[in-house]
Image (spheres, helix red, strand yellow):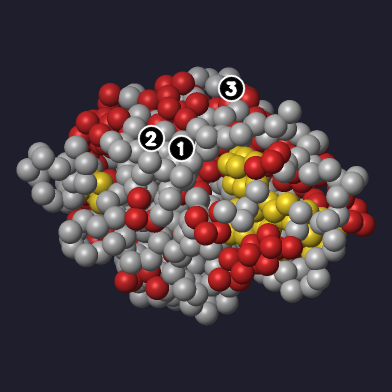
Amino acid sequence: MFTDPSHDRRRSRRPFPRRPARLLSGIAAAALATALVPLATTGAADGSTASPERLLPYQDPSLPTQERVDDLLGRMTLAEKVGQMAQAERLDVAADPSLITTYGLGSVLSGGGSVPTPNTPGAWADMVDEFQQAALDTPLGIPLLYGVDSVHGHGNLQGATVFPHNIGLGATRDPQLLEKVGHITAMETRASGPQWTFAPCICVARDDRWGRTYESFGESPKLVRSLETVIDGLQGKPGHLGDNDRVLATAKHYAGDGLTAWDTGEGDYTLDQGIDQVSREEFDRVALSPYPDAVTKHHVGSVMPSFSSVDWTGDGLGNPVKMHASHELLTDVLKGQLGFDGFVISDWRAIHQIPGDYATQVETSVNAGVDMFMEPRTEGQTDWQDFVGTLTQLVEDGRVTQARIDDAVSRILTAKFELGLFEHPMTDRTHLGDIGSKAHRAVARRAVSESQVLLRNRRHTLPLKAKKQRVYVAGSNADSIGNQAGGWTLTWQGGSTNVVPGQTVLDGIRATARRKVTFSETASTPVPRHAAGVVVVGETPYAEGFGDVGGPQWGYDPGDNGVPRPAKTMQLSDADRAAVQKVCARTTSCTVLVVSGRPMILPASLRRQVDALVASWLPGSEGGGVADVLFGRRPFTGRLPVSWPRSVAQEPINVGDAGYDPLYPFGWGLRTR
Ligand code: GLC
């Protein structure tokens, strides 16, 4: 239910419209007032602070965070407070960073694929530091938070270690590994500037037709909870958020993003951003249950609500409530019952889906408990500048209380203090050289190996004998690092032609079997005698609703260059199906690897020809990890994080369902050695 699926939202910008004079006077007045009071400077450009005797309480790192927050809050005007609650996109301020100063912006983000030129670690750090300096130039010098979707490593950054997407990490069942993945992700993110990642998605994917299934650790809330150790890796232990290898994490999307109904009776056939038509009990048991641990055990610093809605079936409400508008779930449950003391960041322009005019949307979401607003500019529509003016007016009109503003701003400031941004606002580049390092890639390679799920292994086909066997490789996803990385890699949607440093699955096979490898994507070249066949099939990249198995409106897909591609189907492409048939008919053994963001449908007629079948998921940059298990350097240990259906008609299918009869059940996985 995108507002305009045909409109690629990451690319449009609109000129700065004239703004109400009152707002600017708000900041200007603050500047004038504080200019009359000689404030201690925040110190040298490197962020080191001035001598203690000249520090104001909020500038004094020896004081408890709450004292510093209270002191700073007491010095802030309404305009400065509202500015802290606003987040712009990089493109909105890149041409004029002084907008950050003028509006006292609390945060800037990079949307998927919104990267500096050149897309290098140094350029990222320079960009973030330039925006940071603009924030420090405000009267109170409140540092900026820079957020990015490091959802499988710092995927937007060319050269970063790109880990398997969450569905593959779910197959590892390895909480300790997840903590390492989180730590490396944090190190590579923070060293390049951003101090905040919009990750992990702790969604519970219940219908594999959902385009974000691959962002989930799996269909079981218990499995998802067990892997929230990734938050510990991202943030470090309490008190370490200020370290140069940690970032603020975001538990998302709160809650029920993966529990939406395929057909709500309106004939809409959509999943992403849809409606949870479930009982309150099921919502709590499936969608909500990952959050208590994320909040109380892993101390996640921010939470992002879901675009989706809840519609308690059987409670007679009958009208779906947007998560961004739910006071009950954002304030009573999340902040009240669960005791969440971080801040709530809205999703991308999500409040525009709330009924009513813009003022009503802002009023509803602020009062529901959203604290910071991701309001990037979009052609001809309201955005962060309108947000600031609108919220200021709502407070002046009494529709939003000062207490609510102070609560939101206190939460935001607390995160900034705990990140150490007042003492060290500029990027600490100590680990810049570790980005994409051999050591990091070795961990990613291990994650790839542990994520491989051996579904079938007739006649002990696997592991292959590298030294003795010739290997014939085919299939669309054998030699495409863009396809094996999937969405949120260099660009929002990812892309088959996207290239990051690393190894494709074929590279890994070649590095092992050396001269004995023949590759033909379409299996059109002759097959050597006695060769073992490996066909790597799967999906092309996508993100969010563009990955939904298409109902009528999901025919649109931005593709690599805006040329629409057919909607997703969970079926093998004709080319892949043909490659399997050709290879399996001519080789001594036939192994099929499925490189995809979710289970794919393998008809019985095809399966009969296949000796070994592996779910490889979206391995990311280290395709060599697939070869490690294929040739027995590492054992197969992976287990299905989602049920593998016999047909799309079985969806949604989840362990525990009545009449549960998948092709391969949740938790399935053969082991070798
Ligand atoms: C997107 C996604 C969210 C992401 C945000 C910023 O709409 O729903 O997961 O963090 O925008 O890119």
Task: Name the residue rendered at 50%, 26% in the picture.
Answer: 226
Q: Are marks 3 and 1 in contact (CB under 8 Å)?
A: no
What amino acid is labelled 3 in the image? Lys
Left-right relation of 296 to 281: right
Viewer-proximal residue, 262 or 615? 615
Task: Name the residue rendered at 52%, 79% in the picture.
Answer: 563
Nearer-N-terminus badge (1/2): 2
Query: Mark 2 Cα within 10 Å, few/some/many (few <14, many 20+)?
Result: some
- Indicate yes or no: mark 2 CB to ligand 1 under 8 Å: no
Q: Is residue 96 visible?
A: no
Q: Nearer the viewer, mark 3 or mark 1?
A: 1
Give the Cα distance between marks 3 and 1: 36 Å
Residue 512: image location, x then y, percent: 86, 47
Give the Cα distance between marks 3 and 2: 34 Å
Task: Give the residue number, with chain letter if any, for mark 1.
Answer: 665
Task: Name the residue rendered at 84%, 43% in the picture.
Answer: 465
Could you tell me which secondary element the residue under label 2 belongs to? loop
Task: Give the residue number, with chain letter if any, for mark 2.
Answer: 655
Give the Cα distance between marks 1 and 2: 7 Å
What amino acid is labelled 1 in the image? Pro
Q: Which mark is residue 356?
A: none
Could you tell me which secondary element the residue under label 1 belongs to? loop
Q: Are marks 1 and 2 in contact (CB under 8 Å)?
A: yes
Q: Which mark is residue 237?
A: 3
